Image (cartoon, helix red, strand yellow):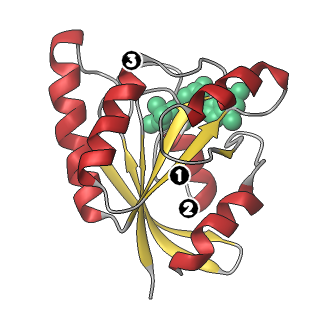
């Protein structure tokens, strides 16, 4: 049975970059500027011989500080409810932020199945962030580089039981 994977996490961790890599068409906009991507985006994804529906949670980028938390929460909860499994991305170069902790809390409460991924994991600058990610209590972080295509076989192994 095909499953639905929601890619969630705070702005700028690389969700759309991963979505685009998995979906293979530029259905989600990726941009360094805030305010470019909106809402939820769905695409038919492939990883090796696994096919699934991927959801990119966008639409957080243009929220101002006052509305970000509420909006982030509503959008993430919508994606979580649509998904069989959530892939929670953190930025291994930045390490865990208070906003990441808020996401972790939402996912612990609401999601049936969460996979944790430390993105931007190429190179040594990511090592400390990967170790910090263990502290979220969501299991072993899958080390990814969405931009460089690293860690895709580890992601495949994590998704295989769902396919
Ligand atoms: P989103 O806001 O979570 O959707 O993040 P984006 O996919 O828009 O990416 C935010 C920024 O991180 C962009 O400048 C990307 O090029 C960059 N980025 C995404 N994945 C990686 C990665 O694996 N390594 C590095 N170094 N940068 C990345
Ligand atoms: Mg995005």
Q: Which residue is mark 2?
A: 23
The local secondary structure at tag 3 comes to helix
Q: Is residue 30 visible?
A: no
x and y percentages locating residue 113 in the rendered image:
40, 61
- Determine whether the residue tagged by mark 2 lies in a helix, strand or loop: helix
| Front residue of this view, candidates 88 and 132 | 132
Q: Nearer the viewer, mark 3 or mark 2?
A: 3
Hey, which quadrant is residue 83 in on the image?
bottom left
Residue 74 pos. (x, y %)? 17, 40
Ligand 2 lies in quarter: top left
The answer to which image quadrant residue 148 occupies is: top right
Identify the residue shown where x is 58% and y is 20%.
Answer: 95
Q: Is residue 72 left or right of residue 135?
A: left
Q: Earlier in the sequence, mark 1 or mark 3?
A: 1
Question: CB atoms at circles 2 and 1 under 8 Å apart?
Answer: yes
Determine whether, in the image, residue 6 is placed left or right of residue 124. Answer: left
Q: Are marks 3 and 2 in contact (CB under 8 Å)?
A: no
The residue where tag 1 is placed is 19
Q: Is mark 1 within 8 Å of ligand 1?
A: yes
Q: Quadrant of the C terminus?
A: bottom right
Q: Residues within 10 Å of mark 1 (few under 14, many from 20)?
A: many
Res. 19 in view: yes
Q: Residue furthest right?
A: 123
Q: CA distance from mark 2 to mark 1?
A: 6 Å
In depth, the one of 45 and 160 nearer the eye is 160
Residue annotated with mark 3: 98
């Amino acid at each position: 049975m095909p499953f639905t994977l929601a890619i969630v996490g705070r702005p700028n961790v690389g969700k759309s970059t991963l979505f685009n890599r998995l979906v293979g068409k530029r259905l989600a906009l990726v941009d360094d500027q805030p305010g470019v991507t909106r809402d939820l985006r769905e695409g038919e994804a492939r990883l090796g011989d696994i096919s699934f529906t991927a959801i990119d949670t966008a639409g957080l980028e243009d929220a101002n500080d006052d509305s970000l938390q509420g909006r982030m929460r509503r959008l993430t909860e919508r994606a979580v409810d649509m998904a069989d499994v959530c892939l929670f991305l953190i930025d291994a170069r930045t390490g865990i932020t208070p906003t990441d902790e808020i996401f972790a809390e939402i996912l612990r409460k609401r999601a049936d199945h969460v996979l944790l991924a430390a993105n931007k994991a190429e190179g040594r600058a990511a090592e400390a962030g990967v170790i910090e990610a263990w502290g979220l209590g969501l299991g072993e972080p899958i080390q990814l580089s969405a931009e460089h295509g690293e860690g895709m076989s580890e992601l495949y192994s994590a998704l295989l039981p769902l396919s």
